Image (cartoon, helix red, strand yellow):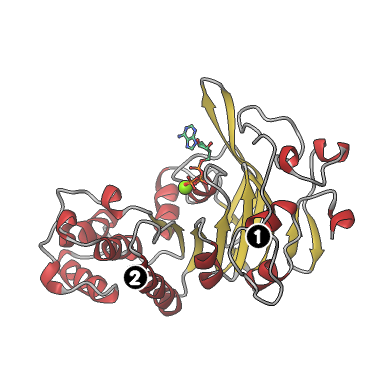
Amino acid sequence: MEPIIEVKGLKKYFQTQRGLLHAVDDVTLSIERGKTLGVVGESGCGKSTLGRTIIHLLESTSGQILLEGRDITHVKDKELRAVRERMQIIFQDPYSSLDPRKSVDATIREPLIVSKRYKKSEIDDVTRELMDFVGIDERLRNSYPHELDGGRRQRVGIARALALNPDFVVCDEPVSALDVSIQAQVLNLLKKLQQQKGLTYMFVTHDMSVVRHISDDICVMYLGQMVEKCPSKELFKNPLHPYTKALLSAIPSVDIHHPMKREILRGEITSPVDPKPGCRFASRCRFVTEACRQPQKQVEASPGHFVTCCRLNEIV
Ligand SMILES: Nc1ncnc2c1ncn2[C@@H]1O[C@H](COP(=O)(O)OP(=O)(O)OP(=O)(O)O)[C@@H](O)[C@H]1O
Ligand SMILES: [Mg+2]
């Protein structure tokens, strides 16, 4: 399978008062069409920035972004608009991402009008189809975001994101703000829509059970760097990077037959502002040696299992 999205050496730095913040630092990955790549890691590790940079909501600092093999890193104007239509985002909190002054109908209709893809006469039908597609009752079309519960609001966000038939969707914590009872419904909806439309997802979350449920592959990030990426099953069965192991050890009974001892991370968290070269996890890693202070290479430990750790042979 050809990847639909490829990212090579992607960097996104922010200029801050304290210095240059390395939010995404040299990330290389690819996603195959119709698959879901889960992205996990603690708050501030750059998950959202990675997703937003790939879909061109943020301008990359350096590196390459390819869509179906075509380099789209520096597209401008008309091409940029076309690329953005093909890559959409579903946000965590539909309440703040939806315009409070727009009704459900107007919210979903807007991208259809802006795109100029449809005739006026078609837009009513397409809007209705979209509402039906994501399971919003037609009677809610004149409601406003504050009149809907969290689950329905997120359905509106999903309808809007899918209005122009994108290929690739970044789902940025799409269920984290929802009641647990609603989370499964929205996850199942996302899965169903993916199958029906052949969508490719990047699914950002810090909920390990959600990511396990939804992802084909999982990418683990730590302070802007990708430390590990492999098929979801493999990650839970055979985590290799010391940070991944610590992350998984915090979930109660991932595998009841092989319970992991909970590992408490000690040591100072490295600052993402003007960081020194080398592994960002070094300051908290119990396997650290001098070699970890050098720039690290991503290695393929087994087919499809990528790890960025120079101590791999010593710790497995
Ligand atoms: N516009 C910005 N200007 C400056 N720094 C930013 C900006 N956006 C993000 N950052 C910083 O970049 C880093 C990565 O942020 P990001 O929001 O991508 O993390 P995240 O993994 O999505 O976190 P969370 O799980 O809390 O959503 C953080 O240190 C954050 O403070
Ligand atoms: Mg985020």
Three-letter amino acid code at the position of disc 1: Ser
Q: Nearer the viewer, residue 56 or 233?
A: 233
* Callout 1 secondary element: helix
Q: Residue at x 21, y 48 (%)?
A: 99
Of badges 2 and 1, the one in the foreground is 1
- Tell me the quadrant of the picture where the C terminus can be found: bottom right
Residue 188 appears left or right of 239: left
Q: Residue at x 62, y 42 (%)?
A: 223
Mark 2–mark 1 Cα distance, whole angstroms, equals 25 Å
Q: Residue 137: percent from the left, percent from the top?
A: 17, 74
Question: Could you tell me which secondary element the residue under label 2 belongs to?
Answer: helix
- First-in-chain label (2 vs 1): 2
* Residue 301 in sight: yes
Label 2: few (<14), some or many (≥20) within 10 Å? Answer: few
The tag on residue 262 is none
Q: Is residue 35 visible?
A: no
Query: Mark 1: is the Cβ under 8 angstroms from ligand 1?
Result: no
Task: Give above or below for 140 relative to 10.
Answer: below
Q: Is residue 72 above or below residue 180?
A: above
Tell me the tag on residue 249.
1
Q: Quadrant of residue 300?
A: bottom right
- Residue located beneath label 2 in the image: 181
Looking at the figure, which quarter contains the N terminus?
Answer: bottom right
User: Amino acid under label 2?
Assistant: Ser
- 76 left or right of 307 in image: left
Expressed as whole percent of the image width and height from the top left, the position of residue 222 reads: 64, 46
Residue 239: percent from left, percent from top: 72, 63
Q: Residue furthest right?
A: 314
Q: Do the residues bearing badges 2 and 1 touch, measured as CB atoms within 8 Å?
A: no
Where residue 299 sits in the image (x, y, percent)? Answer: 80, 56
Nearer-the-camera pick, 288 or 105: 288
Q: Residue at x 33, y 52 (%)?
A: 93
